[in-house]
Amino acid sequence: MNPIATVTPSTSHLFPALRTTSIALAGALVLLPAAALAQDVGPTDTSAAPTEQPTTESASGKRFAVVGGYALAEPTRNPQIDGSRVQADGDGVATLSASYYVTDNIAVEAWGAADKLGHRVNTANGKAGSVNSQPYAVSGQYHFRDADSTVRPFVGLGYYESNYDNENAAPTGDLAGRRIGVETAKGAMATAGVDLNFTPTWFARADMRYLHGGSDVKLDGANVGEAKLEPVMLGVGIGARF
């Protein structure tokens, strides 16, 4: 009788599969905490926060400007009064102006002398008298180039008046002993100038103004002629806009 043979199944083929399963399980245990941490933190925002750009001040859009300066006035004509050719000396005076800019290029200006100009009146025989004047004007101006340009030329055209007072005859001259009267001069004023911008607020100005017009002259109450001095005024100043 043959003994019953006991067959023992071989397990050697299971070891490779177990090894593969163990490695996969270990890898999963390692990766699971990292994945969970990444889920808690959430996705990284790679977009950069906006950077604030520094603000730059500009002269554009500023509507008001004021200028303080000094001007020299020199008459361009020598009128004939009561048969005598007279010459009025020039003088210097402080000036003030205020402008409103309708746009960056178009402005309306009010301008005037802050004090009186003193004029010595001469004839061929020497000093005949003296008179004071004080001009003021309103004009429209056009300023070339952009508001922030360093150099800005401008031109203007307007209307002026010049008040005369303190008319005095010299004690020894062609008008000695006579009462002098000079009416207010009126007429057109032409302006040309240039602004030199230091900053969007501060600037320097140089300008030339031509005052075209005249006024009636009276001696002892009688009209004896027209004084058309038509001075040219050369000025410089410092201004600010806001």
Image (cartoon, helix red, strand yellow):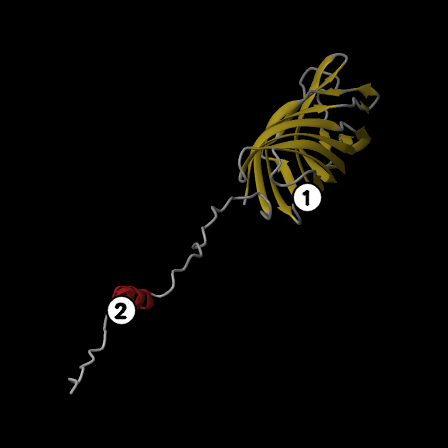
- Residue 33 in the image, given as x and y percentages of width and height: 26, 66
Residue 17 against residue 115 in the figure, above or below: below
Q: Nearer the viewer, mark 1 or mark 2?
A: 2
Q: Nearer the viewer, residue 166 or 199?
A: 199
- Residue 52 in the image, given as x and y percentages of width and height: 45, 50
Mark 2 falls on what kind of element?
helix
The residue at which mark 2 appears reads as 25
Classify mark 2: residues with Cα within 10 Å, few (<14), some (14-19) or many (20+): few
Q: Earlier in the sequence, mark 1 or mark 2?
A: 2
- Residue 55 in the image, given as x and y percentages of width and height: 49, 47
Q: Dividing the picture into quarters, in which one does residue 171 lie?
A: top right
Q: Nearer the viewer, residue 31 or 71?
A: 31
The residue at which mark 1 appears reads as 105
Q: Residue furthest front?
A: 1
Q: Quadrant of the C terminus?
A: top right
* Dot label at residue 188: none
Left or right of 58: which side holds 218?
right
Q: Residue furthest right?
A: 83
Q: Residue type at mark 2?
A: Leu
Left or right of 133: which side holds 197?
left
